[in-house]
Amino acid sequence: MNNETRREGARRRIETSYRSNRAGFLRRAGRAAGGVVDAEDVVQDAFLAALNNLDAFAQVSDPVSWIYAAIRNRLIDLWRRDKTRRTVGQVDVGEETLREIVSATGLDPEDGVVQEELSDALAEAIEALPERQRAVIVAQVFDGRTFREISERTGLPIETLSARKRAAVGALARALRGWIEEP
């Protein structure tokens, strides 16, 4: 098979994956990105990455998994961008929550080096949280919503949301402690 045929086949697989899984891609990105606009941007960026790398994509055996991984990578970039915004003075509920998580690891939450080194580990740990806990963390950290706003939106009692956040913060702190203790 010649190079152009492989590239065209890769392009068709990308288009088919997009048409067949767009709603799932947007749901996944929307949960983590916190908004429809960011979710659409993340999904579009992931597909552009695939289209801009047709030669590499032609070797991919599972295009849907590859695109989900590209979406995850774009979400991490989005979180880093948001972290940078907080660093230059746009402090919000998310910053307070991040400080709480870093403090729970036993490290100094004011140490910028610590925060920078842990940001990747934190993104992975958030991804690994159970959906109910992750939803509360994402709503507060990335959307800047209060418990009252989340409660009104979901119909869940504030106490339930608070308990989920405490459990998430504990799980994130344990995950980060594990990351710190790695050789």
Image (cartoon, rainbow, N blue to C red):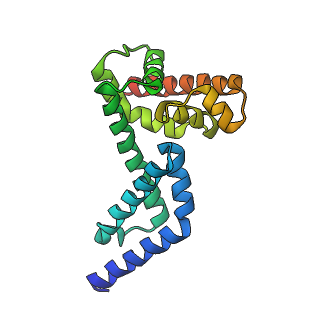
Q: How many marks?
A: 0
**Is 85 above or below relative to 39?**
above
| Residue 63, horizontal then vertical, whole percent | 45, 66
The N terminus: image quadrant: bottom left
The C terminus: image quadrant: top left
- Whether residue 20 can be seen here: yes
| Residue 74, horizontal then vertical, whole percent | 38, 49
Please tell me which residue lies in front, 147 or 75.
Answer: 147
The reply, left or right, for residue 88 in relation to residue 134 is left
- Whether residue 62 can be seen here: no
**Is 179 above or below relative to 27?**
above
Please tell me which residue lies in front, 82 or 120.
Answer: 82
| Residue 28, horizontal then vertical, whole percent | 53, 51
The reply, left or right, for residue 81 in relation to residue 171 is left
Please tell me which residue lies in front, 32 or 183.
Answer: 32
Please tell me which residue lies in front, 92 or 173.
Answer: 92
Query: Going 45% across and 55% down the picture, which residue do you hit?
Result: 40
Query: Going 54% across and 65% down the picture, which residue do you hit?
Result: 21
**Is 73 above or below relative to 183?**
below
The reply, left or right, for residue 53 in relation to residue 159 is left
Query: Going 44% across and 15% down the picture, which residue do you hit?
Result: 103
Residue 167 in which image quadrant: top right
Query: Going 36% across and 13% down the picture, which residue do you hit?
Result: 108
| Residue 102, horizontal then vertical, whole percent | 43, 20
